[in-house]
Image (tube, grey):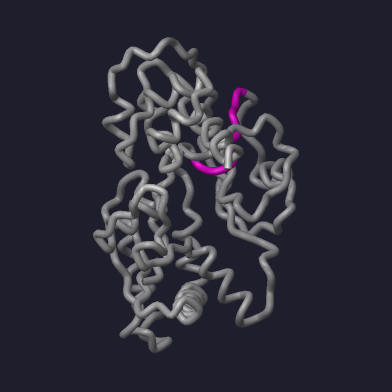
Amino acid sequence: YVLGNAAECEPYLTIDYRTIHESTEKIIDGLHIEMKITDAEKGIIVLEDNKKNCLPILETAIEKLGYKDSISVVLVKTKYPQGGEKSIVKAVLNKEIPAGKLPADVGCVVSNISTVKAISDAIQTGMPLIERVATVTGPKIKNPGNFIVKIGTNVKDLIDYCGGVTDDDVTYKAGGQMMGFVLSDVNVPIMKGSNGIIAIEPNISTAVECIKCGRCMDVCPMELTPLYFAKLADAEDWMGMKEKNVMDCLECRCCEYICSSKIPLVSKIKAGKAAIRGMK
C-alpha cells in the first residue's frame, strides 16, 4: 500500500485541505507514480471525517484519470494525533508498526499529500521543490491564510504580508499549535518542512515537581510512560530512556499539554533522543 496522508489533525493548519482543492489531479497522479516506484498494488488517500466535502472532489479526479481500480479514498475519525504515520496505518489497515520499525516493515509507505503533489511536479514537469504551501494563522495574525511560498522566504516578510499581528504580546511558532516549536526570532527562512507559522497568546507557566498523576500516560497515543522520561532525562540516563522506548515517541505534545506540573516533557524527550542517536 501507499497511503496519501491528508489526515490534517494539527490545530490551525489547513494546508492539506487547500492542496486537495487546488491540486487534486496532481495528488492522484503523484500517488500513482509512487505506487509504480514502490510496486504497490493499492493507493489510499486518507482524510479525517471533518473533511467529507473533499471526498467527491478526489473520487471524481480518480475516475477521470482512470485509477478507480487501484486508488481509493478512506475517511478516518477526526482526532489528534491521527496524522502520525503509526496512527494512520493502524486506523486504515489495522496493522501495528512494531517498536523501532517503519511502515515499510508492515507493507506500506506513508507520504503527506504535499509530498505526493511534489512528486508529480518533479516527474511531469521536471520542477524541483522550490516552493511549498504554508498556513499563516493564529488569533494574533490580522489576515490569516494559506500561501504558496518560495523556500527561503523570510518568515517576517510573510507575517508582514498578512498585515502583521494585532499586538506585541505574541508567541510565534513554526508549525502547529501542538508539534510546532517557538520562534525567538522571525528573521528565519521558510524551509521545505515549514508547514505553517502561527501567532498565539504567550504561554506563561512554571514547571514544578512531577506529582505522578499519570495523566501523561493516559493520553499518550503510543502508550509510553512520559513521566519517567522527564526523570531519566534530568539524570542523563539515556539508556534508561531507550529501554522505555522513547524512540517511539511521536513528539505530539499531548503529554506536555495535559501535564499538571507543566513540565516541558517534549524538550526532555528530544534531548534523550538526540543523546541516544549520538550513542550509535
Q: From this viewpoint, which residue is outermost toward the bottom?
A: 66
Q: Is residue 194 placed above or below 138 in the rendered structure?
A: below
Q: Give the image location of residue 38, x and y in percent.
A: 47, 76
Q: Is residue 141 visible?
A: no
* Quadrant of the rendering where the N terminus is positioned: bottom left
Q: Is residue 160 placed above or below 235 in the rendered structure?
A: below
Depth check: 201 or 211 in front? Answer: 211
Depth check: 211 or 122 in front? Answer: 211
Q: Who's the residue at 69% across and 70% down the image?
A: 128
Q: Quadrant of residue 6?
A: bottom left
Q: Who's the residue at 63% across and 75% down the image?
A: 122
Q: Who's the residue at 51% across and 75% down the image?
A: 30
Q: From this viewpoint, which residue is outermost toward the left?
A: 94
Q: Quadrant of residue 221?
A: top left
Q: Give the image location of residue 249, x and y in percent.
A: 42, 40
Task: Please give left or right for residue 255 compared with residue 113 in the image.
Answer: left
Q: Is residue 225 visible?
A: yes
